[in-house]
Image (cartoon, grey):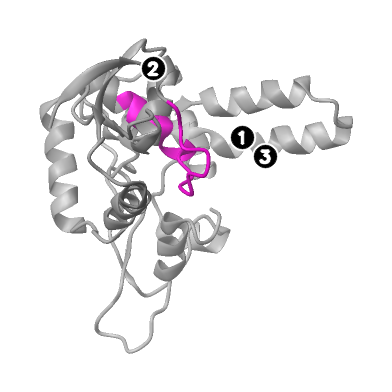
């Protein structure tokens, strides 16, 4: 297996690529920026991408001139098509051991300044979980066992600008502003763009712990932190456990 550097301009995306890659581009770009190149792009004899469309898009975002490439010139056209689909499909067949994943994420957070949310992981600190009460035959949101997170000072107070990443939302708002759609449609779309705000709940928890009582009250009213699950359920901030899992999986909107 020979890895070679190739100008990114020589590489061609596969025009019928059935995989939608855009949602992973930011995370992959962050990974390349943090760890460097560890997985080359695989292309066929005509430099058309077989595996690595997301890495290609991330490289374009990072404005890289050259990228590591493997030319799979030993594959037939049929094998190229099959490999392209198989590589993506096999990634879907694995799953996380959530308990071990939480341990690994916690260790990384404690021992380094690497922010794993940059790579698509949801933040585990302050995450809402409702545990089923095994003593009851039916699940009731007001009687389920609940563990309320404790918000105590762990380190330095973050800057308010660190609590949320509005890059994607602002990009959409700029695009909407430049469009020719009616003003009422623009207002609606700009409101929708705010759904793309990316909150850093670990830093929110730390900021909350340092904040004044007035700020803490407003954070609680905004459901940026949850102190009372019963009250949060009544207000609709959190739902049944099955609904929470559906939100996490993307089956329903938050």
Give the magenta range.
12-30
- Describe the element under mark 3 as helix, strand or loop: helix
Residue 154 counted in the magenta span: no
Q: Residue 192 carries which label?
A: 3
Between 158 and 10, the residue placed more toward the observer is 10
Callout 2 secondary element: helix
Determine if residue 248 is in view: yes
Name the residue carrying label 2: 8
Residue at horizontal 34 percent and vertical 73 percent from the top = 144
Sort mark 3 into few (<14), some (14-19) or many (20+) by Cα contacts within 10 Å: few
Closest to the camera, between mark 2 and mark 1, is: 2
Residue 208 visible somewhere in the drawing: no
**Which mark identifies residue 194?**
1
Quarter occupied by residue 252: bottom right
- In the rendered structure, does residue 13 fall within the stretch colored magenta? yes
Q: Position of residue 239 (x, y in %)?
A: 48, 64
Q: Residue at x 42, y 72 (%)?
A: 142
């Amino acid at each position: 297996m020979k890895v070679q550097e190739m100008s990114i301009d020589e590489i061609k995306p596969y025009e019928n690529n059935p995989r939608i890659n855009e949602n992973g581009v930011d995370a992959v770009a962050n990974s390349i920026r943090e760890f460097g190149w560890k997985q080359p792009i695989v292309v066929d004899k005509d430099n058309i991408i077989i595996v690595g469309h997301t890495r290609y898009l991330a490289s374009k975002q990072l404005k890289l001139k050259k990228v590591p490439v493997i030319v799979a010139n030993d594959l037939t056209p049929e094998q190229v098509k099959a490999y392209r689909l198989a590589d993506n499909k096999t990634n879907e067949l694995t799953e996380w051991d959530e308990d071990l994943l939480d341990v690994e994420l916690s260790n990384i957070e404690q021992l380094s300044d690497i922010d794993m949310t940059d790579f698509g992981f949801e933040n585990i600190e302050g995450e809402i979980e409702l545990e089923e009460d095994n003593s009851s035959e039916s699940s009731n949101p007001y009687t389920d066992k609940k563990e309320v997170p404790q918000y105590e000072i762990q380190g330095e107070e973050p800057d308010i600008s660190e609590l949320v990443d509005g890059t994607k939302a602002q990009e959409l708002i700029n695009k909407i502003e430049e469009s020719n759609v009616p003003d009422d449609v623009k207002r609606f779309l700009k409101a929708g763009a705010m759904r793309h705000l990316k909150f850093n709940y670990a830093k929110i928890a730390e900021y909350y712990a340092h904040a004044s009582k007035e700020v803490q009250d407003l954070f609680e009213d905004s459901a940026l932190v949850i102190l009372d699950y019963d009250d949060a359920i009544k207000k609709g901030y959190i739902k049944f456990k099955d609904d929470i899992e559906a939100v996490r999986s993307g089956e329903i909107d938050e």
